[in-house]
């Protein structure tokens, strides 16, 4: 699927969309298949739920210890975008990347939730808290044909650590290469809750 200061949010957009394009295909009946760095990281049940996770303030889920620092990170995403006169749409494949920037200490990813444009929880991408070792990362994929999130989709990522650490970088990358077109978007996470003295993620060049 995490706030002392809001992390800088940046969107990089490169669009080359030819006139007359149409979506790749119809949305699926259920939720999208999920991909990740580890095959065993499957999505939770697809039933929508309006509740929002309690945030990093709910300590004690750290693997091997009690949480000292942690954050809840909000990451914007787009299952599709509009173009031309606003009636044409282009489906996007979304990859959520969670990167541990600390070279010495591990962090625990407590939860990864995916929400639609109405703020309803679509699914979770972590069945249980898991650990990210120093400088390691994890990825979660929403397929292009999955439109359940909508143009206002959101990820909420909760992470914790048993000691002071360099905060992770959490980003979403959205791409499409349909019909000889090329489009890519990058969104940076914004911290909405904090536990302890966790600082904002480091800036990228």
Image (tube, rainbow, N blue to C red):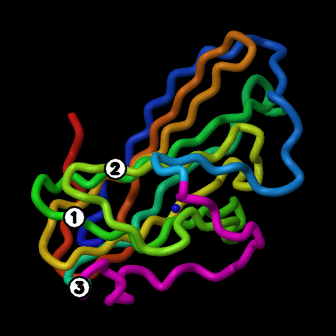
Is residue 151 or residue 91 the one in the foreground?
91
Our reading of the magenta stretch's main secondary structure is loop
**Label 1 Cα neighbours within 10 Å, binned few <14 / some 14-19 / many ≥20:** many
Stretch of the chain drawn in magenta: 40-66
Which mark sits nearer the N-terminus, 3 or 1? 3
Q: Quadrant of the C terminus?
A: top left
Q: What residue is rendered at 60% in x and 59% in y?
A: 42
Q: Identify the mark nearer the N-term, 1 or 2.
A: 1
Question: Are the residues flagged by discs 3 and 1 in contact, CB closer than 8 Å?
Answer: no
Q: 46 left or right of 52?
A: right
Q: CA distance from mark 1 to mark 2?
A: 11 Å
Q: Which residue is mark 3?
A: 65
Q: Which residue is mark 2?
A: 137
Which is nearer the eye, 185 or 25? 25
For image coordinates 42% across by 47% down, the residue present is 97
First in sequence: mark 3 vs mark 2: 3
Horizontal placement of 106 versus 186: left or right?
Answer: left
Drawn side of residue 75 relative to residue 31, left or right: left
Residue neighbourhood size for the residue with mark 3, other residues' Cα within 10 Å, grouped as few (<14), some (14–19), many (≥20) = few
Q: Which mark is residue 148?
A: none
Q: Are marks 3 and 2 in contact (CB under 8 Å)?
A: no
Residue 19 point in image, percent of width and height: 78, 12
How far is disc 3 from disc 1 in space, using C-alphas?
A: 12 Å
Residue name at image x 75 percent, y 46 percent: 146
Label 1: which secondary element: loop
The answer to whether 76 is drawn above or below residue 175 in the figure is below
Q: Residues within 10 Å of mark 2 (few under 14, many from 20)?
A: some
Residue 68 position by quadrant: bottom left
Q: In this figure, which residue is indicated by the disc labeled 1?
A: 106
Which element is circle 2 on? strand
Magenta-drawn stretch contains 48: yes
């Amino acid at each position: 699927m995490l706030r002392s200061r809001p992390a800088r949010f940046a969107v990089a957009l490169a669009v080359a969309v030819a006139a007359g394009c149409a979506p790749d295909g119809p949305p699926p009946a259920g939720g999208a298949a999920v991909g990740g760095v580890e095959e065993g990281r499957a999505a939770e049940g697809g039933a929508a739920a309006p509740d929002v996770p309690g945030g990093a303030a709910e300590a004690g889920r750290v693997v091997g210890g009690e949480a000292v620092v942690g954050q809840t990170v909000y990451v914007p995403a787009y299952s599709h975008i509009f173009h031309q006169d606003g009636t044409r749409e282009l489906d996007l494949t979304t990859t959520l990347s969670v990167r541990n920037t600390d070279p010495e200490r591990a962090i625990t990813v407590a939860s990864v939730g995916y929400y639609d444009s109405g703020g309803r929880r679509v699914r979770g991408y972590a069945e249980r808290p898991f650990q990210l070792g120093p400088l390691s990362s994890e990825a979660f994929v929403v397929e292009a044909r999955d439109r359940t999130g909508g143009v206002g989709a959101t990820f909420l990522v909760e992470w914790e650590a048993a000691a002071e650490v360099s905060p992770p970088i959490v980003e979403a990358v959205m791409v499409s290469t349909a019909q000889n077109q090329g489009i890519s978007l990058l969104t940076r996470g914004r911290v909405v809750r904090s536990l302890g003295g966790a600082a904002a993620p480091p800036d990228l060049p």
